Image (cartoon, helix red, strand yellow):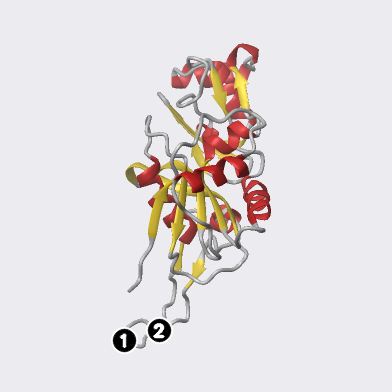
Amino acid sequence: MRNLTLTALEGIPEIQSGDDLVAIVIEGLERSSLVLSDGDVLVLAQKIVSKSEGREVELAEVVPSQRALELAAITGRDARMLELVLGESTEVIRCKRDVIVVEHRLGYVMANAGIDLSNVAGGGETALLLPLDPDASCERLRASLRDKADVGIVINDSFGRAWRNGVAGVALGVAGLPGVVDMRGRPDRFGRALQVTQIGFADELASAASLLMGQANEGYPVIHARGVPYARRDGNGRELLRPKSMDLFR
């Protein structure tokens, strides 16, 4: 039988800047009666990684630029937030009332450059930015756990999609497993070679983990996965980024 088992780790505390995520994850595994094995994957919510890396910014300390003020007039959004968005972006792609979609400095096309006020202490006056380098964050976590097992690490976040309603989990960072699984050339059940099939594997795992993490006050930011069905290799989140030349939506 093929089985994929996802378990939300119990008792993960509110994360603060400088917290040791590895120690916190190990304690969560122990509370959940789990022992890491080679091939397991840990999916961590972006927010706890960003918080541990000190990526919080007080809006009171942000001075909006003229461009941020112009975007605030279009969107109706807080100009201080938009200044942070501009600082994390290389291009504003779409902008209308209540919506700004940008190309993040790391290449993601996303709303608000991934900057969020939800599930962040500070009464709506503290913004949380994405990690500086999610792939590097994943690799550090993986290396710190290597004495226990050879595991994969995914950092996930919730993205909206241009052609679908609702947000879904995606992988921002990846270590120890493929971002994309290329099935081209493999036979289907009738022996015909697949021509175009490439699976966004890390995104699929990130989305599955999001079901247990939740989006509100559930408090399950770390998910343990066992039985991941694809062969392991060293991959990264950059594999999932479609080059602008191949992006049919811009």
Which of 204/77 is in front? 204
User: Which picture quadrant has residue 152?
Assistant: bottom right
Query: Marks 2 and 1: CB-CB under 8 Å?
Result: yes
Q: Position of residue 68 (x, y in %)?
A: 58, 20
The residue labelled by disc 1 is 190
Q: Residue furthest bottom?
A: 191
CA neighbours of label 1 inside 10 A, class few (<14), some (14 to 19), many (20+): few
The residue labelled by disc 2 is 187
Which of 27/61 is in front? 27
Which of 108/39 is in front? 39
Estimate the spatial distance between the alpha carbons at disc 2 and disc 1, rounded to whole Å.
Answer: 7 Å
Q: Amino acid at mark 1?
A: Phe
Q: Position of residue 239 (x, y in %)?
A: 58, 59
Is residue 162 something one can see in this rendering?
A: no
User: Which picture quadrant has residue 228?
Assistant: bottom left
Tag of residue 1: none
Label 1 sits on a secondary structure element that is loop
